[in-house]
Image (spheres, grey):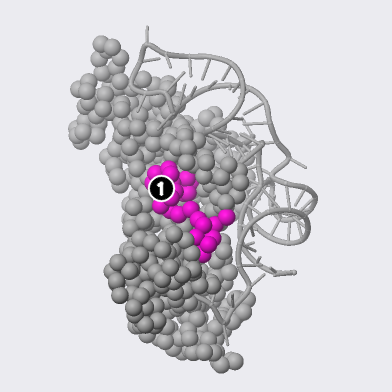
Amino acid sequence: MTPADLAEVIVSAIRAAVADGAIDVAVPATVPVERPKNPEHGDYASPAALQLAKAARRPPREIAEMIAERLRANPGVASVDVAGPGFLNIRLATAALGEVARTIVRAGEAYGRAAERRGVRVNLEFVSANPTGPVTLASTRWAAVGDALAKILDAAGYDVGTEYYVNDAGVQVQRFGASVLAAARGEPAPPDGYQGAYVAEIAARVQADHPDLLELDEGEALAVATREGLALMLAEIVSTLEGFGVHYDVWKSERSLHEAGELTAAVADLRAQGHVYEADGAVWLRTTDFGDDKDRALIKSDGQPTYFCADAAYYRDKRRRGFDRLIYLLGADHHGYVGRLRALAACFGDDPDETLDVIIGQMVTLSRGGEPVKMSKRAGNFLTLADLVDAVGVDAARYSLVRSSLDSSLDLDLDLIAKQAPENPVFYVQYAHTRICGVLRNAAQLGIATAGSSAEALAGVDVSLLSHPREADLLRALGELPNVVAAAASLRAPHRVARYLEELAGTYHRFYDACRVLPQGDEEATPLTAARLLLVEATRVVLANGLRLLGVSAPERM
RNA sequence: GCCCUCGUAGCUCAGUGGAUAGAGCGACCGCCUCCUAAGCGGUAGGCCGUAGGUUCGAUUCCUACCGGGGGCACCA
């Protein structure tokens, strides 16, 4: 019996109590089922009675007794106690709890995934860094978190499309092109230009493709340097992210929006909605109608569209492509966008609470031996995604970036992270998976069939033998994955999966320490061996599924 | 000045209004003739920033204040 099953059983018990007239209250659709920290509080606990007490106008303990009485009729429930202010402390029959392992092995990679699709199309945009330089460490956090979130949302039943917005139009791009051209000529970067070795590298590659670059007239040379430099830079960003395991469904070019007339169309739509006006020679959107601090310019007085205008066109484009909900993953330095984006959605006639989700992640800071390291893209002084991966590998990099809440700023000590020491919890989690694989290998060598090998073997395992406290701990932990995935998805909090895996790995290590799985010496395999092997396999499935959601590998050997 | 966010063990951080607030690292003491010791057990370490409020119950929600970080363009 999984926690979800138990929640249904409790709801049924409430429904029965209401039908009998024992309590008078609306039957809830579902109830919370928690894992108590204190083992004396049972396998599972539910505060359902506490939550119903007010509506039922009865003391919580009384409600709890009414539910408990009916709960005891279920054969999977060994005992129910009413404790404290009115908690239901539930102990499952050993066999019922043990079934969790069989359920998991049977489901395999599907375990933890929502049974049904929600029919909601979600667009998730993240990183979207300007193609004027390599992917920096700050953006690397959004890459790791965004990719994990996409996988988690997919597992939770959403149809997810991931997207990278390429800012290949505008002033910064011109500055980048001018910097590339200057580098090609051996001149210093222009004021407000980009510096750094990568600019010279790009310049050299542009020259290799266009040997006549320096003979072209100024305008043409600048055009070539800009166009080709941008293409090379973007290609490098794509391959760096792919190497990091981050794949996008769509790379959306800002320039393509301009060229397709999308900005004009967006302004026309907004005008039709009645939120556009002219002032001081510019065209404005009255975002203050919807809570923004100030109105935002769409077209500057020189006739050029603003960046915000492109944002509007992009928002409209995503919605017209059928996305119900748009998630933007932004850094704290962009939090000022929240108000104007929400107002923008409202100006298009959408309800931002329904269509928009702007997630603000705090910044990544760097230190080296306790000393802060400054990052500046234009000065060319930064650590890149590629540098980080070179130092610690993809798994450690992704894991360390994804295991913290987005609300908390992250400080990476380069000296520490470069050490690849067990200070990084990713090793702890991966090691649990590795140990399991070792046990399974040894079982195969001993000629012991694992439960996952055939439907018959799986059905024949006596899970009621899993009665050791460490086995029960592990079973309860394994049952949590679907809840964790659902919570991580709805709270947009991938770090919850990581924290769960750390806890599960610890629970497994403690089980492993206390419970011998395979026969020793010349002992024969017993039904308990089979039951424990099933439990071990179930743990492997959950660790592998969880790590996959984070884009971290589950190695068989370390 | 206004807005966002954080403040929890020595350090880095978890904690979806519930029971005695947790983990990893660091410190100290133990555990391999036994499936990988990258592991396990134990000890020490906390006015959950401060002060109020909301209620059966607040680390969690609200208000104010203190401290750290970030932001307030007809820039991109």
Residue A317 against residue A390 in the figure, above or below? below
Q: Is residue A444 visible?
A: yes
What residue type is disc 1 on? Val
Which residue in the protein does label 1 denote?
A: A389
Q: Is residue A26 above or below residue A181?
A: above
How far across and how far down the image is residue A291, in percent?
A: 60, 76
Q: Position of residue A545 (x, y in %)?
A: 35, 44
Foreground of the two, A420 or A178: A178
Q: Residue at x 33, y 75 (%)?
A: A213
Residue A395 falls within the magenta-colored stretch = yes
Name the foreground residue: B13 vs A82. Answer: B13
Q: How many marks?
A: 1
Span shown in magenta = A374-403
A159 relative to A167 in the view: left or right: left
**Residue A131's image quarter?**
bottom left
Q: Is residue A239 magenta?
A: no
Place residue A37 in its image quadrant. top right
Q: Does residue A419 appear left or right of residue A231 in this picture?
A: right
